[in-house]
Amino acid sequence: MKKIRGYMFSRSFMGERVPQHIQNQVIRNYCLQNNYHYLLSAVEYSMENSILILNQIFNETKNLDGIGFYSLFQLPEIDSERSKFLRKILKKKKFAFFAVENIILSSFRDIERIENIWFIKKILNTCLTKEDFKYHGKIFPSKKS
């Protein structure tokens, strides 16, 4: 049975905030469904962009088979750090899963998929919302003939 250390946040990530007990339940249930031996989750420090605990988990991977994330949006936000981290996992012959998205990182091809999802999420955060369109409609009313 593969041993997994969970990883979760005490802060918001990509505009989302999920209570720790919910993150823990989701990771634990994912492990049960996939026959992984779940070792309790480590919680990242609440400081913005902190990855100290994530690096600590990575350094203990000699005793683990992988890392279980609640969401792939808990990976480092800085593109170069995220890509470097994902590659380090695979180079150590380990894997990671992202329970909410039901994605497993087990090959270098998976990195491209994860990065594409990150790219889309970042772009979506800059798009106009329905409220923005309503607001702009008042400033620039449509011409009536």
Image (cartoon, rainbow, N blue to C red):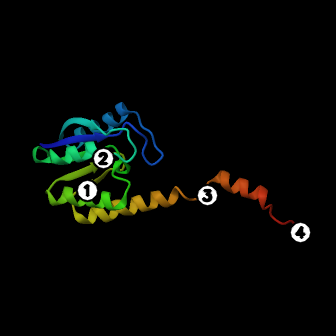
Residue, x 35% and y 30% (percent of image)?
21
Q: Which residue position is annotated with label 4?
A: 145
- Placement of 109 over or under 53, stated as above or below: below
In what element is the residue under mark 3?
loop
Which residue is tagged 1?
85
- Outermost residue on the top side: it is 21
Three-letter amino acid code at disc 3? Leu
Name the quadrant containing residue 115. Answer: bottom left
Answer with the quarter of the image where residue 6 lies: top left
From the image, tell me which residue sits under label 2. Answer: 51
Instruction: Kindly identify the amino acid type of the residue bearing the numbered disc 2.
Output: Ile
Q: Residue tagged by mark 3?
A: 128
Instruction: Where is residue 12? Give x, y as percent.
Output: 43, 41
Report how far apart the C-alphas of labels 3 and 2 lie in the structure: 31 Å
Of circles 2 and 4, the one toward us is: 2
Q: Amino acid at mark 4?
A: Ser
- Quarter of the image with the N terminus is top left
Nearest to N terminus: mark 1 or mark 2 = 2
Do the residues under discs 1 and 2 have CB atoms within 8 angstroms? yes
